Image (cartoon, helix red, strand yellow):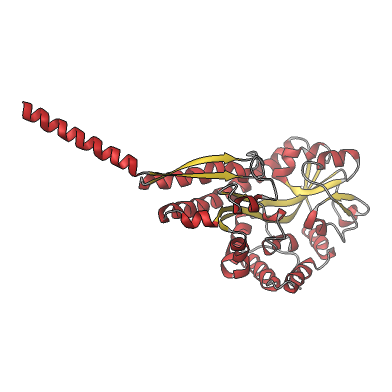
Amino acid sequence: MKRRNLSHALTVLAAGLALGSAAQAQQVIKLTAAAGHPPGFLWVKTLDETFIPEVDKRLAAGGKFKVEWTKAFGGTLVKLGGESKGIADGVADLGIVSTVFEAAKFPLQNVSYYAPFGTENVDLMSRTVADLQKTIPAMADAWTKSNLVYLGGMSLDSYHIWTKFPLTRLEDMNGKKISAPGPSANWVRGTGAVAVAGTLNTYYEDIKSGVSDGALTFVTGAWGAKLHEVAPYVTRVNIGSQFAGGIAINKQRFDKLPPEVQTAIREAGDAWNAQYARAQGAAAAALMQNLAQAGAKVTDLSETERKRWADALSPMGKTWAADAQSKGLPGNEVLTGFNAALVKAGAKMPRDWTK
């Protein structure tokens, strides 16, 4: 009995030591994830609810590593438009980088804003830019030069127009003031309307006070801003989904991580990319229905008028590409590749922006 008890005790002790050794062998890695936008924005929500859990799930399967996360969203650690610098400097390890607000660092990533009326397919837009980054070194270099590793992209759902007035023909735009900041102002010039600067945070009061008569924006943003209350005419123009940025990690931090952790992070980026696109597309469709139920007058601009709108605009694609070329960047190659990829995928583009 004593021998059996001793043998049992030794077995239990050995098992305990093995478990303790395994627990000690598991390496804890501390990472801080940041975003300039708050969690209410889908790209941040899915960073928190898809990307991070996907990393954890993959590492749990291996058992060797575990990430201890610190989450700093809503500009608490890095501000909107300054995410790339904050991550590059190590203030945060990874997070959302909004290339649309950092055109100086990521000029080629903003190609979609200069080739509008492309596609409303969020996933197609993100994949198109991702593929260009793989085949055109200058696009990938923009991330590397910023001390970042690109993990996955995000695109906004298609832009439409919210107005105080009914819109059925291009002439209805004459003399109107439309909130359309930054490169989206190019989508207004030539229509007879005047572009007015602003943001989603100011559109409601601008329209209500008469600063503008409407706004060009996307439904997932417009619904949150309640624009239909002051601009009840919602005309689906399909100016197109727009690439806006993605998740990136500090390159030096990433390079020092164990290969297994690097793989988990890259795979989580792919999973996030796909889930975000599905969620964004579904949200846009649902919210467009909600607008009609809320009393908005939702209509579609005819294909004829949509083409007239596109044709009325300046050759912004060629102008953008030429400007990029003058700075030693392959603007022509990016624009041509972007246009060709959308056409090949079946996008019905009313205008060839390469001409």
Q: Residue furthest right?
A: 175
Specify the quadrant that holds the N terminus: top left
Q: Is residue 302 visible?
A: no
Which residue does the image show at 72% across and 59% down from the upper left? 103
Residue nearest the observer in this picture, 70 or 202: 70
- Picture quadrant of residue 7: top left
Residue 112 as seen in the image, left or right of residue 18:
right
Which residue does the image show at 90% across and 38% down from the upper left? 209
Image position, residue 11 (x, y; %): 16, 35
- Picture quadrant of residue 349: bottom right
Residue nearest the observer in this picture, 332 or 218: 332
Vertical relation: 152 (above or below) 330 = above
Image position, residue 212 (x, y; %): 88, 45
Residue 318 as seen in the image, left or right of residue 53:
right
Specify the quadrant that holds the C terminus: bottom right
Residue 38 as seen in the image, left or right of residue 235:
left
Q: Residue furthest top?
A: 1
Q: Is residue 267 visible?
A: yes
- Numbered label tally: 0
- Picture quadrant of residue 329: bottom right
Which residue does the image show at 42% across and 56% down from the upper left? 259
Residue 351 as seen in the image, left or right of residue 169:
left
Image position, residue 181 (x, y; %): 81, 52
Residue nearest the observer in this picture, 306 or 154: 154
